[in-house]
Image (tube, rainbow, N blue to C red):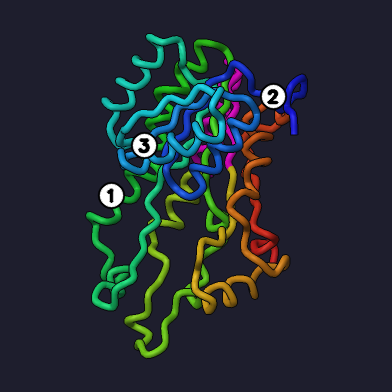
Amino acid sequence: MSFKKTKFDLSNKYALITGAAGLLGYEHCMALLEANANIIITDIDPHKLLETKSNLEAKFPNSKIISKNIDVTSINQIKDLSEDLKNINAVPEILINNAAIDPKFTGSDNIELTRLENFSVEQWNKEVSVGLTGAMLCSKVFGTFMARKKRGVIINIASDLSVISPDQRLYQKAGFDDSMQPVKPVTYSVIKHGLIGLTKYLATYWIKEGVRCNALSPGGVFNNHNEEFVQKLTSLIPMGRMANRDEYRSAIQFLSSDASSYLNGQNIVMDGGRSIW
C-alpha cells in the first residue's frame, strides 16, 4: 500500500520510539517506516537494539533509521539524545512512549513474588519508573520541542488493562494453594491506568501549540503462549482469538498522521472486544 499523497503519509517526519526492540516496539517501527517516516529507535538493551536496526534496514534499505541506547528513566540521557538530534536536524515530531517492563515469573521459586502481599517496593519503583515516569520524561523533553515547532503527536502505549482489571484466573497454575498462585502484578495495571491519565493531561497541555496526545491500548498479542493460557484468554474475547503482532500497525499510522488530526486525548482500545464483555 502506498501512503504517498494521503493523510497517512509521514514523509520527511521523524518519529521516536522507546522500547523499540520489544515485540510491539518493532511493529510500531514497521508501521512508521511503511508510512515513509524517518525513525529514531531507542532501547535499554544495546544488543537487541542493534539487531532491531539491522532487521529494519534490511526491509527498508532506503529509509533513515537512527538508533540510540538510552534508559528512559534518566532525564540526562533523554536530554543528551534530544541535543544530539537537534544538532542533526532530526528532532522528532512524533513520539511513541512504548518502553515498559512486563515481568515474567516462570520459576516455581519466585511465583509468590508477583502477589501483592509480597511485592517489593523496589520492584514497584523499578517498573513505575520505566513504564510511567519514563513516558512523562520523554514527553517533557520532546513535547517541549514539539511545542516550539508548533506541531507534534505523542502516543502512549497502554493496554486493555488500562480500562479493566486483570483476570487473575488466567495465570493460575494447578497444584498451588490460593495464597501461592501467580498473578499479574499490581504495577502493570497502575502503570497502564496512569498512562491514560498522562494522555489526558498532555492532550490539553500543549494543544494551543499544535501538540496532540492519544493512547493505544492493545489486547493480548500471541507470542508462542502455551495452549492452556491461549484457551483461557480467548474465551474472554468476543472475536475468539488473540491479536497478531502486526495488527496494530494501522492504528499507529492513523494516530501518528494527519488522518487523526481531530483526535485528541483518547484511548483507542483494540482488544478484540474483551473489555466490553
Residue 198 colored in magenta in the image? yes
Residue 9's mark? 2
Nearer to us in this view, 120 or 221: 221
Residue highlighted by disc 3: 50
Residue 119 inside the magenta-drawn segment:
no
Taking the spot 45% from the left edge, 18% from the top edge, the residue there is: 144
- Looking at the image, is mark 1 or mark 2 nearer the viewer? 2
Nearer to me, 26 or 7: 26
- Quadrant housing the C terminus: bottom right
Q: Which mark is residue 274?
A: none
Q: CA distance from mark 3 to mark 1?
A: 24 Å
Q: Is residue 83 above or below residue 114?
A: above
Q: Which residues are magenta?
A: 196-215
Q: Residue at x 68, y 40 (%)?
A: 250
- Type of residue at label 1? Lys
Q: Nearer the viewer, mark 2 or mark 3?
A: 3
Q: Earlier in the sequence, mark 3 or mark 1?
A: 3
In the displayed structure, does residue 37 sit left or right of residue 144? right
Callout 3 secondary element: helix
User: Which residue is drawn at the image coordinates 46% and 46% (left, top)?
Assistant: 194
Residue 204, quarter of picture: top right
Residue 205 can be seen in this image: no
Residue in the picture at 40% in, 47% down: 100
Which SS class for mark 2? loop
Mark 1 Cα-neighbour bin, 10 Å: few <14, some 14–19, many ≥20: some
Ranked by sequence position, the earlier of labels 2 and 3 is 2
In the image, residue 244 above or below residue 12: below
Residue 29 x/y as whole percent? 53, 36
Disc 1 marks which residue?
A: 126
The amino acid type, in three-letter code, at marker 3 is Leu
- Give the farthest residue toward the right: 6
